[in-house]
Image (tube, grey):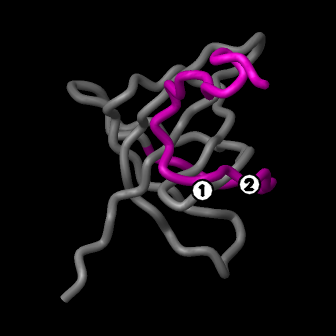
Amino acid sequence: MESVEQTLSPLRFDRRRGLREPISGTAVAVFQRPGRPPLLTSVRVADHGPGGLGVYCDAEIKPGTFFNLYPDDPSQPRRTGRVVRCQKLSTSFRLGLQFQQSLAA
């Protein structure tokens, strides 16, 4: 018989709605920073899910910052949204980007 600790799953603090799949690629991101000029920078894509991307960036970008993302692969669409996570790594930052949902007509 299993104990209560074995049958209960750990609390989930990650609010993602779906699974993340690792991918690679690069893109140019334009971050709209309040009271400052927009920041144009290259990002490296780490993973994707139903509502967004995980990317690596050389700049610290505060959660809530809006972005436009232009993939280097021309077959991929331009995306917009906001930064929902920024984690400092040793030499860069890991950002969580949430896509803006399109409204159906």
Q: Is mark 2 in CB contact (under 8 Å) with mark 1?
A: yes
> How far across and down, in percent of the image, does residue 27 sit?
65, 54
Q: Name the image quarter holding residue 72.
A: bottom right
Give the residue type at disc 1: Gly
Packing grade of label 2 (10 A; few <14, some 14-19, many >=20) is: few
Query: Measuring 51% from the left and 56% from the top, which residue is drawn there?
Result: 69
**Disc 2 on helix, strand or loop?**
strand
The stretch in magenta equals 1-30
Q: Local crowd at mark 1 within 10 Å, few (<14), some, or many (≥20)? A: some
- Disc 2 marks a residue whose amino acid type is Glu
Residue bearing mark 2: 21
Q: Is residue 101 above or below residue 44?
A: below
Quadrant of the image containing the C terminus: bottom left
Q: Helix, strand or loop at disc 1? A: strand
User: In this rendering, is residue 68 above or below 83?
Assistant: below
> Which quarter of the image is occupied by the N terminus?
top right
Residue 48 coordinates in the image, percent (x, y): 64, 54
Report, in whole angstroms, how far the alpha carbon at label 2 lies from the one at label 1: 6 Å
